[in-house]
Amino acid sequence: MQWQSPPLTKLYSGGGSISVSLHGEKAVFSELASTYPLKLLAPYIHDKTALVYLLSYGGGLVGGDEVDLNVNVQRGARLLILSQGTTKVFKTRIGRRQASVHAKGLASGLPSSQHDTTASLTQQTIAFRIAPDSLLLLLPEPVTCFRDASYHQRQTFHVEGNGSLVILDWITSGRISRGEEWVFSRYHSTNEVFHDGKRVAKDIMLLENQELGPHIPERPLRERLKPYSCYAMVIFYGPQTRPILTDLASRYDQITIFKEKTPAQLIWSLSPIEAEDQGAVVRVAGLETEIVKNWLKDSLSHLEEAVGRDLYRRAFV
Amino acid sequence: MARAPDLSFTEPARLSISPLPAMANKDDTETYILLLLSDSNLPTGSFVASAGLESHVKHGFASLSASPVQATVDFVRDSLGSYAKSALPFVSDAHRTVERFASCLEQEDGGEGFLQDTLDKLTELDELYQVMTLNHVARRASVAQGVALLTLYSRGFSRPPTLSAFSAKESRADESQMSRLLNQFKLKVRREEVPGHLPICWGVLTAALGLKLERAQYLYLFLHARGLLSAAVRLNDLGPYGAQQILLHAVRPLVAAETERCKILRTGLLQGSDDGFDDTLSGPANTWPLGEILAGRHDLQHSRIFNS
């Protein structure tokens, strides 16, 4: 698959573009543009690392919103992308936001939830290019889908040469304070990694409440995912992730399971990506978001060495 | 009884059962193949795979269900749901690919190029399944069972010369072309040029045997569920009678419902981009992240009797 550089011309609503390059020993944003409801905030440079906060307008997306972002990390540069607060996905609603002008066929034909027969999809599409010697760290807060929300996220990563990346994709069960526990209608998240044009990993997670038939007892999503209320996945790829992976692998190998009576507060798994032994996938589940967040913050702390303590401290706050 | 029609013209290419009067129609032939394939003694590797069940129990998750029986039913249901959604599209596309090869053999235009083209498509499907199975334990189990199926075909289902008198002459050439396809695919697996994952190999095997896609899909999910139940029996979570009760009363509707829900799913590889294929609705997906984590942690168990 061939990477096409993002068009510098007109951006659609919800569209955006980030490009980071290296000038001498310092990173610069050679491009940083976004349109409502997407916002790119507080760009900051520290040595070779650029930081930007990605957030949707007002911190949330409603039914019909579309975000379409292109990100380009050029040779030698490092880019850290964070978000401010969780990405909240509100209930789908009739019609579309006024600002969302380009309708795509995706929203039609979706299995409609039992609560809302005119469900319109909220979707976020991001394409990343990670040049040789560069590093992308995508460490946003988790996605929180509210009751009846329908969310679709697609992220594509094109790694070139010895480029590296750490991608965090996570979801919480909803607004616990309102008793929401996995009661959104649909969550579909795709993360696909290519290395020099060859697909090396493709993760597709689909969470939805669906009934199977009249004589089959209900089994809501909550039952399938219990007792945990937060699920995270991290994809590591490229040589700059090696120190973290070595560390994680030795911790993982020390775990021994005898016979547990009840599930632990947090569990995690580590699987290598087999292509050229260049990466790994880590999955984590925890009783509460905070438990997962603390685990991630601790486990990824080697990233401090790459981006510096000050920048790393802004992640997982 | 009237003379049985010569089946070699209507459905050759795959293993053609000679037209015995009692086997005169296609349906009976398929039923016979189903009986053979559902034999729990076949060396398909399900003896050593628990698809995460052992780890699930060991991690204490069975305690979340009301009873051990309920825990097994819940596990089968969640596992089956995710497996149907993630693996069945690959069974379907591999089956279609080989079925197309078979129908071209019938029309006698199955040249060398077509065999290569079929191999390429299967390779592409296998590689996509490999990069989508991001759990090393599941990958390991899947390739072990996949290659077992290919061996099953070449050693257990192909027709030895000593039994050639039982076949219709016209179908022998097509049969040997099909054998060549499967042998070459197996060779690629042995050389580690392709992984040889279970859903792809199942689609290949069942199409080569002339089983219709829908039956192949249904049987695939049934075998997954039955494998889980025999694992539960071996783990002593259930007795054999209890497992049989679950198979009859719970697994039957679940397998039927999941087949119905997932039979139209595709991988997207065989379609052109202008076919309007929407992978968020019709493509493969994982639906059970908890199952992924537990299956991935299999090797962390202090003692274990399965290899997945």
Image (cartoon, grey):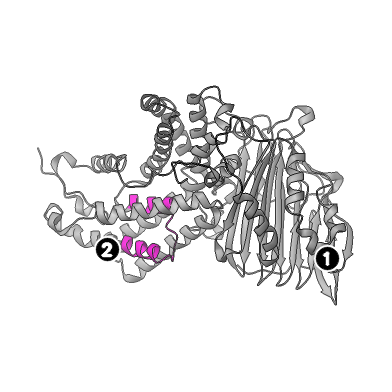
Q: Is B192 colored magenta in this rendering?
A: yes
| Front in this rendered view, residue A170 or A184 | A170
Give the chain letter at badge 1. A
Query: What secondary structure predominates along the stretch shown in magenta?
Result: helix
Which residue sits at x=39%, y=67%?
B191
| Front in this rendered view, residue B256 or B302 | B302
From this view, report whether residue B155 is shown above or below residue A182.
Answer: below
Can see residue B95?
no
Residue B197: image x %, image y %? 44, 54
Are labels 1 and 2 assigned to the same chain?
A: no
Disc 2 secondary structure class: helix
Left or right of A63 in this view: B288: left
Give the chain letter at badge 2. B
Q: Which mark is residue B177?
A: 2
Question: Residue at the bottom extreme?
Answer: A24
Disc 1 secondary structure class: strand
Which residue sits at x=46%, y=32%?
B254
Residue B226: image x %, image y %? 40, 36
Q: Which mark is residue A49?
A: 1
